[in-house]
Amino acid sequence: MELDIKEIIGDIKFDEKIITINNGCIILNDGTIIRSGNSDTTLSHINKDTKNNNDLWHEEFEVKEFNTLIVNSYINVDFSIGKQYKVYVEAPKEIVETLAIENKGNELHLNIKQDTNDTHNIVLKVVAPSLSKIIANNISIVNVHAPIQNNNIIMLSAHEGSKITLSTITCANVYITVTEGATMTISNIEASKSIIAKTTQGAHINITEYAHTPNIYINTEQGSTVDMRGVNADQIIAKSGGASTIMLAGEAKDAEYIAGKRSNIIAQELVAINGKATTTELAHIKCNVTEHFEKHSSILAKIVNK
């Protein structure tokens, strides 16, 4: 019943400080991606619309091929699917002039060169055939309006109060990291191998409609939450700690719940055939295991099997 993450998703190793992927990337535990190789910061300015529309300035950029989108500095990004790689900017002229749009290898970086008080009007529309990684930092907002498909792994990271919203993801493996009060909302996930979700520091992950995959691994810490609806899995391991909460609904063949000090796992709406629940001090687990159930509860902790 133990879930071997490395066996499921191949050459990915989990460690407390660093995660390495054997394709030239180094991914830190906070979601930061370091890639070896030369940077290419060239982009083409292909159109400039000098007409003002309600005091907004419009510009269009054609950028080089990328599969990673990195957004910083409290700007809003709308991503959509298209054959070409482009960025459309709509904002007051003085703000447009502070934007930094850069290609670095296979990454597209969107940033602001300097602080500005008028940030609510910054809207960047990004178009590409697909994405494999999205990273949002510094209270930025990323909305993905089209389904994202990938034959291997899709990595999603939100930090520093940022928000990422996606409709549908279809791939082999989905890896989600959310920290520092950020929020990740995904309607549907269809993963042929695994879903791995990690939250900490008051962050939130919401899967609102369904999460279909053979294997699910969830880890929450430091007051964060994961709410996953429509689960359909062979195996699920949910581990909470540090006053965090995991909420689950759906069905699984095998489920293992581990609640650390002062944390909660609420899984009464997830029907599992076989289950194991373990709690430490002041933790609570509520589950719904229909056949074989094993529990281990410590002092002042509580386990309830519906």
Image (cartoon, helix red, strand yellow):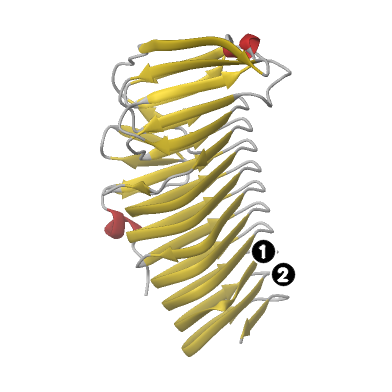
Disc 2 on helix, strand or loop? loop
Percent position of residue 64, x then y: 32, 20
Q: Vertical placement of 241 versus 271: above or below?
A: above
Q: Is 178 rendered above or below residue 212?
A: above
Residue 185: percent from the left, percent from the top? 56, 51
Residue visible at 32% across and 33% down in the picture: 25
Compared across the picture, whether 205 is left or right of 181 comes to left
Image quadrant holding the C terminus, namely bottom right
Q: Disc number at residue 261?
A: 1
- The residue type indicated by label 1 comes to Lys
Q: Residue at x 49, y 41 (%)?
A: 157
Q: Dot 1, how many residues are within 10 Å of its Cα: few (below 14), some (14-19), or many (20+)?
A: some
Q: Quadrant of the N terminus?
A: bottom left
Q: Secondary structure at mark 1?
A: loop
Query: Percent from the top left, x then y, of residue 250?
Result: 50, 74
Mark 2 residue crowding within 10 angstroms, few (<14) / some (14–19) / many (20+): some
Identify the residue at the far bottom of this view.
291
Cα separation between marks 2 and 1: 6 Å
Along the viewing direction, whichever of 95 and 246 lies nearer the viewer = 95
Residue type, numbered disc 2: Leu
First in sequence: mark 2 vs mark 1? 1
**Residue 22 or residue 39, whichever sits in front:** 39
Q: Is residue 232 left or right of residue 247?
A: left
Query: Are the residues at dot 2 and dot 1 in contact (C-beta closer than 8 Å)?
Result: yes
Identity of the residue drawn at 65% across and 51% down: 222
- Residue at 49 percent of width and 69 percent of height: 230
Residue 146 visible in the displayed image: yes
Apparent side of residue 258 relative to residue 168 in the rendered image (left or right): right
Q: Which residue is mark 2?
A: 282
Viewer can see residue 259: no
Q: Position of residue 197 (x, y in %)?
A: 48, 54
Q: Is residue 247 above or below residue 44?
A: below
